[in-house]
Amino acid sequence: MTRAFPDTVVEPYRARYRLDQGRAERPMPRAELLGRLGPVEALVSTGADRIDAALLDAAPRLRVVANFGVGYDSVDVAAATSRGVWVTNTPGVLTESTADVALLLLLMSLRRAGEAFEHVRHGRWRRADPAAFWGDDPAGLTLGILGMGAIGQALARRVQPLGMSVIYHNRHPVAPETPGDPPARWVSFAELLERADVLSVHVPLSKATHHLIGEAELARMREGVVVVNTSRGAVIDEPALVAGLESGHVAAVGLDVFEHEPAVPQALRTHPRAVCLPHIGSATTRTRHAMMRLALDNAVAVIEGRRPQTPVNEPRPRATG
Ligand code: DGY
């Protein structure tokens, strides 16, 4: 385990397996990780660890990489598959808490809450000003969801009582996950860009989605669009987003993820219309514990010769003997 999990979570596993845990407060340096991999059969990794071919080759006994997180862009899945190593992730358990953060960022951005919060925090609020901090009502606005997986659908459910209409783009139209889900209309990528008042990004990061939202796409969006991202920073070309924000074409951004975490460009950190969070989408006690248990259960399943609960690959059978 590249990061230590709380004792309450690991205790049942410790009784059955030898656990080698990193530190809770910081990622394990790569050299240290490589040095500790020799006897490891199951690796519980996080998005901060680069699991590539070189690392897999340093782990001759490895049978599973159990990623802590639904996004597994930090893992070279093809390299794992060809080496007979399972890769698993933690979908489902974090859907609702991540959609909550997307909603939080959406509302904070529309209502200028980040800017207003700073105003009070820094003692700048001197008098009642009826003209200050006018934002926008969500009612009547169109939310465009890019990537209608579980989290996108959970966000669509959340904005219905706010009176927003929802359009989405996904490779294919999706059947609603929950019966009675609010109507959301599939549109082309171009129409999504052109019609959304608020764009919320929920696609995983891959070669195909890297910088999917760049200068040209931002230029196609409505003047005054709000951009929310709780997926992966690199889906958006960050300098292009900053330029859009600085020109006013993008009215506000709500970001939980960044292209080069933990680095956040100064222009975003200091812009009054940027609400920036340190990748806390799934950070509730209940959700993080559920993610940890799912990652550990996936690891243990493979060690015990069972199929993991949430695999992302079908590894080649390993040579025996
Ligand atoms: C995920 O689940 O991919 C998150 O980004 C991890 O915190």
Image: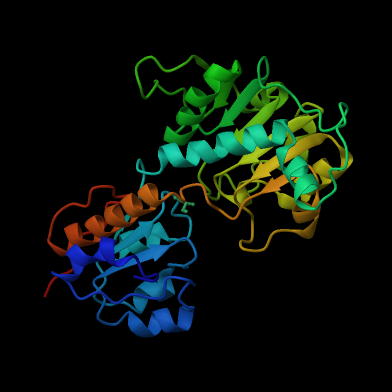
Judge left or right: residue 139 versus residue 240.
Answer: left
- Residue at 55% x, 50% y is 207
User: How many numbered callouts?
Assistant: 0
Q: Which quadrant does the C terminus fall into?
A: bottom left
Q: Which quadrant does the N terminus fall into?
A: bottom left
Depth check, front residue: 169 or 256:
256
Look at the image and tell me whether residue 302 can be seen. yes
- Residue 60, percent across and down? 27, 77
Judge left or right: residue 162 versus residue 183.
Answer: right
Picture quadrant of residue 127: top right
- Residue 272, percent across and down? 80, 45
Judge left or right: residue 316 versus residue 271.
Answer: left
Judge left or right: residue 5 versus residue 265.
Answer: left
- Residue 198, percent across and down? 67, 29
Picture quadrant of residue 146: top right
Depth check, front residue: 78 or 262:
262
Question: Is residue 91 placed above or below 55 in the rendered structure?
Answer: above
Q: How is the image coloured?
A: rainbow
Look at the image and tell me whether residue 186 can be seen. no
- Residue at 23% x, 48% y is 309
Question: Is residue 91 placed above or below 179 in the rendered structure?
Answer: below
User: Farthest residue toward the front?
Assistant: 127
- Residue at 42% x, 18% y is 181
- Residue 216, percent across and down? 77, 38
Depth check, front residue: 85 or 277:
277
